[in-house]
Amino acid sequence: MTGGRAVERFTVPGGTIAYEVAGEGDPIVLLHEGIADRRMWDRELPRLARHHRVARYDLRGFGGSSPASAPFSPVRDLAGLIDHLEMERPLIVGPSMGGKIALDFALAHPGKVGGLCLIAPGYSGMDYDHVPGGKATFERDETLSRAASEAWAAGELELATEHLRQLWATALTGSSLELFRTMVRENALEVFEDRSARHETREGMPAAARLGEIRTPTHILVGDRDNPAMPHLANFLARGIPGARLEMVAGADHLLNLSRPDAFDSALANLVSRVRGSAP
């Protein structure tokens, strides 16, 4: 049980995916980041469930989901969850690694997506060389990432987590910061060793080369206290996705819904209105 809701599971090739679903109304699916699990949405799930049917789930190997030991597709996992729950064109919220999955899903299944809320999103085909200003910030990213990896390899999990905090979570305080640390500690094999990600497969051309094909309403959020590379990447996506809206959020880091929950709530509400207005 999580917050009074039963954790459910559905079967995927090679394992099971843990998920929760609550509420009634227009559907929303919440993905999570590669330094978190579905608990990053502890605040949002009950709030959104007042007016929506909301699902959140753990990616392979995170939280309560089985780790991958053979080739798998996170896009197929997401499609399986949506079909399992019989959701019709949900709005998909994709932060970071979840954003990458959401974009690939929108390209693979355009008829199954009602809207995209992307938070500091990654994307397949990402290359700092083609992002203006991005390459210059890559060295800082690499330095802190390398320090985290070296600390983990030396058996110093707390130090490794601190390096990740400096890279991704500089705005978090109090219970939100503790939640970040807990999620990193409890998902360390995925965070530091890519236990499941090393088995990930994808189909078709990378999203970076296909952004113009996305026709669903899209809102992109990025924090001004995030990794300095992220605004450059978000700008690249906003320029490439027709009609996409980009919002820079003051005081937010990579876990934007935790560092600036008010800004996330407002942006999502605006996107919901936009999606409803564009529905046939």
Image: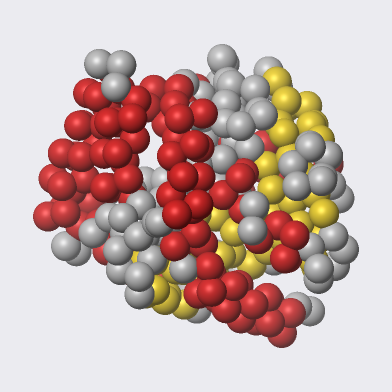
Q: For this rendering, which residue is in front, 227 or 185?
A: 185
Colour scheme of the picture:
secondary structure
Identity of the residue drawn at 64% across and 52% down:
42
Percent coordinates x, y for residue 272 in the rendering: 68, 75
Image quadrant of residue 163? top left
In the image, residue 1 above or below residue 52: above
Q: Is residue 74 left or right of residue 139?
A: right
Quarter where residue 70 is shown: top right
Image point 29% across, 22% down: which residue? 156
Task: List x then y, in percent, for residue 146.
Answer: 20, 31
Residue 80 visible in the snapshot:
no
Q: Residue 23, located in which quarter of the rendered image?
A: bottom right
Q: Quick one: 113 or 40, which is closer to the camera?
A: 40
Residue 258 seen by the camera: yes
Left or right: where 125 falls relative to 195: left
Percent across and percent down for residue 135 are: 16, 53
Which residue is drawn at the image coordinates 45% and 22% (left, top)? 189
Q: Residue at x 40, y 56 (%)?
A: 173
**How many callouts does the rendering have?**
0
If the image is split into quadrants, where does the N terminus sit? top right
- Tell me if residue 157 comes above or below residue 37 in the rendering: above
Question: Which residue is the extreme one toward the front?
Answer: 174
Q: Is residue 228 above or below residue 177?
A: below
Please state the horizontal and vertical placement of residue 102, each as a whole percent of the image.
Answer: 56, 52
Judged left or right of residue 27, residue 71 is left
Image quarter (top left, top right, bottom left or bottom right) of the C terminus: bottom right
